[in-house]
Image (tube, coloured by chain):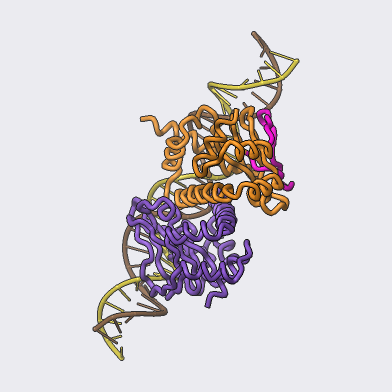
Chain colours: A orange, B purple, C brown, D yellow
Amino acid sequence: MYELLKQNLNRHIKLNEEEFGLFLKRLSVKTYLKDSHLIQSGQTCKYTYFVNKGLLRLYDINKKGYEKNTLFAKEEWWVSDLYSFHSQKPGAYFLQALEDTEVFQLSKPAMENLLLEIPKLERFWRILHINAFIAQQERVMDMIAKTAEERYRDFIEKFPEAELRISQRHIASYLGITPEFLSKMKSGLKH
Amino acid sequence: MYELLKQNLNRHIKLNEEEFGLFLKRLSVKTYLKDSHLIQSGQTCKYTYFVNKGLLRLYDINKKGYEKNTLFAKEEWWVSDLYSFHSQKPGAYFLQALEDTEVFQLSKPAMENLLLEIPKLERFWRILHINAFIAQQERVMDMIAKTAEERYRDFIEKFPEAELRISQRHIASYLGITPEFLSKMKSGLKH
DNA sequence: CCTGTTTTTTGATTCAGGACAAAGGAAAAG
DNA sequence: CTTTTCCTTTGTCCTGAATCAAAAAACAGG
């Protein structure tokens, strides 16, 4: 049941059974049905989520009223509206299940307690966020330097099941293009 | 001399005089002349830098051979090629001084020692990188949803001295547009 | 299985921003 | 102070991607 989480924590730190047990006690398991929301814009974000099974998308709505996908979180991803979660102020993002999704959720106080009880976790999350930052930085560079077609190819390469699990309009939104243009790109890509 | 650094650390954690003294012992002060490089692409990044006075730019060179600015680091910013620094593998970024710049530099072993000696620093860098991630995520959303003109205005708002301290071609590259287009935007021909 | 809804495709048109060229400006080096 | 070099402006033409519209395909729910 908690194998994936254990594996994930072990990527950066070593927890003994007792510590891992404590970690488990602090979080709660929850299942969200497809299309339901875990986070709503305007509300203060209560939890950080670890995706054990399923798929989520984080998005916001821009001035013109269009949804723009920030990231997809599949199995073994941590996801939250980090600004809202850490500041405990109202956030701008939505988090929605694209499939029936089982998450382990950790409230802000639970996380703070864990950080005091198991100081190694400071290191874990430090490394996690360094990696997240690096990935995001690369994505900015891709937006600056690459064409939509290159970005699409890179995305599919990094996340091959994406086409099966995510609708094209969501992929388009993630890439920063319209669904129409993505469709045209794909039909011209075949030759 | 070290007031800015002290202030920076105190934003997220409290260090006593002894701890701060230890921190200082682990870093070294260095001045880089305008146009000189602190990091070269292809080499393993030795240090993380705290800018005490001056201005740096982090950039890479894309396939077509163009330089693309990732970020500018002015006073009170931490900057490095995080991937290369933490993995100790060759990196892709360049870091260059845009002005004569005084930095406090921290080597990877020095940082690891500090993290063992003053575990609170895990927390410090965790929070620092969370904030960096949030800012970078917002920048991605801006690239997706905003026009070049909006991005330019936002940038100037967040960093008003930019126009005085940074040349237009560097700002253009940061925004993901050509210098010619930035010039046209500014002259108002566009609207 | 049909029927309404959401996605995807295709097409025509438009626009933000790029490529290239050339000329003015500023600033550093001699 | 002059020359060279780099930086910014201006102009013309070009293209990647958006917009709008509408048909075709895929997907629910009863």
**Residue B45: x %, y % from top left:** 38, 58
Res. B142 in view: no
Taking B136 as reference, is A109 left or right?
right
Is residue B76 magenta-colored?
no
Stretch in magenta:
A28-49
- Quadrant location of residue A151? top left
**Residue D20: x %, y % from top left:** 60, 40
Q: Toward the viewer: B176 or B38?
A: B38
Identify which residue is drawn at 58% across, 47% down: A121
Q: Toward the viewer: A144 or D13?
A: A144
Identify which residue is drawn at 37% across, 53% down: B91
- Quadrant location of residue B110? bottom left
Give the quadrant of the C terminus of chain B: bottom right
Identify which residue is drawn at 39% across, 60% down: B46
- Does B91 sit above or below residue D4? above
- Does A82 sit above or below residue B7? above
Identify which residue is drawn at 37% across, 62% down: B39
- Does D22 sit above or below residue B53? above
- Number of marks in the image? 0
Res. A168 in view: yes
Q: Toward the viewer: B1 or A61?
A: B1
**Residue A2: x %, y % from top left:** 59, 31
Taking C16 as reference, is C25 left or right?
left
Taking B4 as reference, is B177 left or right?
left
Is residue A33 magenta-colored?
yes
**Residue A65: x %, y % from top left:** 66, 45
